[in-house]
Image: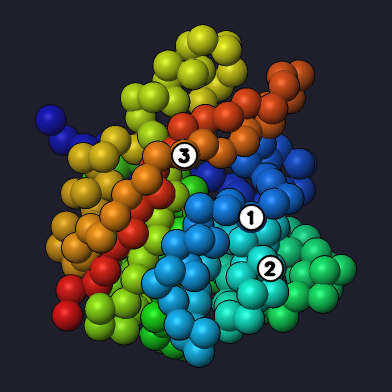
Amino acid sequence: MKEQPQKTQNWNERYLTADTPWRHEMAHSKLLELVEKYTADSDKILEIGCGTGAEAIALAKLGYDVLAIDIAEKAIELARAQAKHEHSQAKFQVVDFMNNHPHLAKFATICDVACMHTFTTDQARIEFADHLAAHLNPEAIWINLSCAKPAIDKVAKKTGIDAPPGLTLTEIAMAAAQHFNLLEIHSTTIPVKREHHPLTEFPVWVSVFQKNS
């Protein structure tokens, strides 16, 4: 069966209308823990799909040199304002990562917090991983957080709250296979706030990959 093309969204419009149930104020602790485990103090970090910047701001406060990018101009505007408020040195740029950007330096670590799971086809996710590999040094680290299917569907059914996008372990592995080796993987949860519903914890995978040398 032929794979359907990747669906597109107007992410900037969603930030302009505050249709952002994924937005969170606190950085995901497991991601910070894994960055500290694998990233030296002098290493540069790239965060893709940074949203309003919670992770990038926290990482910069820990002393890392962080560049965070997002396709949505409004998200970057909000992230810069929050970084200034928190006296964080994180840097933010509006970038469409899926277009070629030779101006981006190569990094020791790339963080992807609920970004790859928005890609709806195997081919789109493989292309995403191709771009990641192009911006990583040999043997560098990719830390990915993706909502976990089918577990999120069970939570959605139980609560009546629409689930975020999600990936199976097979889909994550398929995307990474060409350029990366899996180092470790953990299960945890992320909070999602849907309108007229209480804050709900959805299951996620946090994976650590190393680029092939």
Quadrant in which the N terminus is drawn: top left
Query: Residue sitting at 51 percent across and 53 percent down?
Result: 30
Mark 2 vs mark 3, foreground winner is 3
Give the colour scheme of this rendering.
Answer: rainbow
Task: Classify residue 6 as left or right of residue 145.
Answer: left
Q: Are marks 1 and 2 in contact (CB under 8 Å)?
A: yes
Q: Quick one: 145 or 9, which is closer to the camera?
A: 145
The residue wearing badge 1 is 27
Residue 129 screen position, x and y as percent? 30, 62
| Amino acid, disc 1 | Ala
Q: Secondary structure at mark 2?
A: helix
Query: Residue sitting at 27 percent across and 47 percent down?
Result: 172
Residue 6 screen position, x and y as percent? 36, 44
Query: Residue sitting at 25 percent across and 83 percent down?
Result: 138
Quadrant in which the C terminus is drawn: bottom left
Label 3: few (<14), some (14–19) or many (≥20) C-alpha neighbours in 10 Å: some
Query: Residue sitting at 61 percent across and 70 percent down?
Result: 59
Is 187 situated above or below 106? above
| Amino acid, disc 2 | Ile
Residue 164 screen position, x and y as percent? 51, 32
The residue wearing badge 3 is 188
| Amino acid, disc 3 | Thr
Is 62 situated above or below 147? below
Q: Which numbered dot is residue 57?
A: 2
Cα separation, mark 1 vs mark 3, equals 14 Å
Q: Secondary structure at mark 3?
A: strand
Cα separation, mark 1 vs mark 2, equals 8 Å
